[in-house]
């Protein structure tokens, strides 16, 4: 929903000559942020998984408590 809103606002701003200078940076920044999030998603997932393992109850291997 947020992506559609940013895209719509950016496209609306690019249709008028005066605010075109504001519309193109909105689209550019949205594209850059989207690309960074897409590329960093696997790394962030692994980082959160590592934090979860670190703070989880100890791993139990074998039968001794």
Image (cartoon, rainbow, N blue to C red):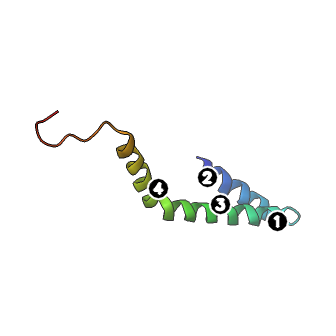
Please indicate whether residue 50 sits to the left or right of residue 27 in the image: left
The first of marks 3 and 1 along the sequence is 1
**Closer to viewer: mark 2 or mark 3:** 3
**Closer to viewer: mark 4 or mark 3:** 4
Height in image: 58 above or below 10? above
Helix, strand or loop for disc 3: helix
- List the residue tagged with mark 4: 44
Label drawn at residue 30: 3
Label 4 to label 3, Cα distance in Å? 19 Å
Label 2 to label 4, Cα distance in Å? 24 Å
The first of marks 1 and 4 along the sequence is 1
The first of marks 2 and 4 along the sequence is 2
The first of marks 4 and 3 along the sequence is 3
Label 1 to label 4, Cα distance in Å? 35 Å
Farthest-out residue, left: 63
Whether label 3 touches label 1, CB < 8 Å: no
Q: Position of residue 63 (x, y in %)?
A: 10, 37
Residue shown at 62% from the left, 61% from the top: 33
Mark 1 is surrounded, within 10 Å at the Cα level, by few (under 14), some (14 to 19) or many (20 or more) other residues, namely some
Of the pair 2 and 53, the residue shown nearer to us: 53
Mark 3 is surrounded, within 10 Å at the Cα level, by few (under 14), some (14 to 19) or many (20 or more) other residues, namely some
- List the residue tagged with mark 2: 4
Helix, strand or loop for disc 2: helix
Whether label 2 touches label 1, CB < 8 Å: no
Helix, strand or loop for disc 4: helix
Height in image: 60 above or below 25? above
Residue shown at 67% from the left, 54% from the top: 6
The first of marks 2 and 1 along the sequence is 2
Label 2 to label 1, Cα distance in Å? 19 Å
Of the pair 42 and 27, the residue shown nearer to us: 42
Label drawn at residue 20: 1
Label 3 to label 1, Cα distance in Å? 16 Å
């Amino acid at each position: 929903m947020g992506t559609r809103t940013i895209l719509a606002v950016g496209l609306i701003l690019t249709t008028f000559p005066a605010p075109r200078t504001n519309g193109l940076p909105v689209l550019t920044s949205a594209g850059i942020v989207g690309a960074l999030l897409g590329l960093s998603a696997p790394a962030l997932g692994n980082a959160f998984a590592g934090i979860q393992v670190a703070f989880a109850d100890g791993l139990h291997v074998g039968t001794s408590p």
